[in-house]
Image (cartoon, grey):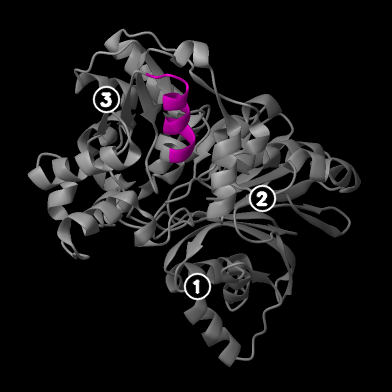
Amino acid sequence: MDGIFGVALKKDCSEVLFYGTDYHSHLGTEYGGLAVLGKKLSRKIHAISGGQFKSRFYEDYKKMKGKSGIGVISTMEEQPIYLNSKFGHLCIVSNGLITNADCLTNGLQRQGISFSETAKKGVNNTELVAKLINQGSSLVDGIENYFKRIKGSCSILILHKDGIYIARDKLGYSPLIIGKSKEGWAVTTETSAFFNLGFSIEKYVKPGEILLLKHTGFKVLKEEEPNQKTDTFLWIYTGFPASNYEGINTEEVRERCGKFLAKRDNVEADLVAGVPDSGTTHAIGYAIESRMPFRRPLVKYNPGYGRSYIPPSQSIRDHIAKMKLIPIKEIIKGNRIILCEDSIVRGTQLKSYTIQKLWESGAKEIHVRVACPPLLFPSKFDYSTKKKEELVAIRTIRALEGKDIKDVSEYIDSNSKKYKKMVDCIAKELDVTTLKYQTIEDMVKAIGLPKEKLCLYVWTGKV
């Protein structure tokens, strides 16, 4: 998932844009970008894999003058994209994944449309969206055109002389929220970007909605789509603790997840801990419910290492996982530890760079408790996991069955014998004393939205 931010003020917006975009740094690791519209449209893009967004853009933003602007923290591709279109000069940022990108690109190329940008996985999705929009009779018609033609999900902001066009993907997988301050208006992926910049939440953009934002306010140009499938992982892992999505706070959801884990558990232990950072709040909830002490046997050195889940290559993910967590032997030695984790995707980092550190530091027992069910399907809507063979649950099922199977319904059912066998095998592979996952039902209850409004595809295989 990427993070996007836009702002329209009565005065120069560059400082607010700089800090608002930086508040999305936990969502991407590869590129950052800013675009500001003043007397002219100025744009800056930097690779941020070797340094933080602030250091890359600190001098740049001071030279970018204008009253409206957009910014992005990107996982895979360079943004914003500039286009001298038939609608005038514009810049666009996007957040999402287009699974039929190659097919759409080939179709446009056959029409004589050229592409100048590339990404590590082929075409630059944001440029593709820009070219699809440019085929419309207006910007709104163009946005509706790309909504209809893409598969996957993609929310966008367009910086234009009219204002900032806002479009949330028609499933509502990725969030967009509008805020108001004394000086104007802003739009964000993460509401945590608002508070310190003086904005209050005014509207959660609905799935499929198209709006135009100016310093005087916003106007709805297209009403919402009927279906909603918001990314469940926002609350479980990817979202910032202080952020709200659909009016529901992330930190509170994670506490409730931990409480549900504790309610279904009967293991005795000396302390409860979380894998920093996102596992920490799940552990706090577990500790509150179980009345066991919360302690920190593992600490993260500093935010500069980022998240080991997001980087595009396994070698980078492994390096971050190895270096960022430091064990405290005095807290670990001789203790029975309940370790709360947000999710287990591949399992390699948890085993090699977390569990191993606890055993080497003298842990007596390690009981892993996971805030979501086993992941059984690669995501259709973001870059997080794209191959089935990456998933530890799928590798385990293949080993148990002796082959790949299409129907994994028994492994989804947490009450089945096959599910329990799968979990036992994963526990053995991870080298932990016991392993338990959250049930789908408890995870949905912890979030508080109706089940049909949440994207549960990675757990159920159903959109």
Q: Which residue is label 2 attached to? A: 72
- Residue 412 position within the rendered picture, expressed as x and y whole percent measured from the top left: 18, 48
Quadrant in which residue 189 is drawn: top right
Residue 329 rendering spot, x and y as whole percentages: 51, 16
Mark 3 packing: few (<14 Cα in 10 Å), some, or many (20+)? many
Q: Amino acid at mark 3?
A: Leu
Q: Which residues are magenta?
A: 352-363
Asked if residue 205 is positioned above or below residue 293 in the image, the reply reads below
Element under label 1? helix
Q: Position of residue 69 (x, y in %)?
A: 74, 49
- Distance from the alpha carbon under mark 2 to that under mark 1: 23 Å
Mark 3 or mark 2, whichever is nearer to me: 3
Q: Is residue 213 visible?
A: yes
Counting residues from the start of the chain, the first of labels 3 and 1 encountered is: 1
Residue type indicated by callout 2: Val
Looking at the image, which is closer to me, 442 or 19? Answer: 442
**What residue appears at the point 21 percent right and 19 percent down from the top-left corner?**
263
Task: Please give the residue where the numbered disc 1 appears in the rendered image.
Answer: 145
Q: Main secondary structure of the magenta part?
A: helix
Residue 120's place in the image compared with 366, above or below, is below
Q: Residue visible at 80% across and 57% down?
A: 43
Give the residue drawn at x 70%, y 59%.
80
CA–CA distance in space, label 3 to label 2: 35 Å
- Residue under circle 3? 261
- Dividing the image into 4 quarters, which one contains the C terminus? bottom left
Q: Dot 1, how many residues are within 10 Å of its Cα: few (below 14), some (14-19), or many (20+)?
A: some
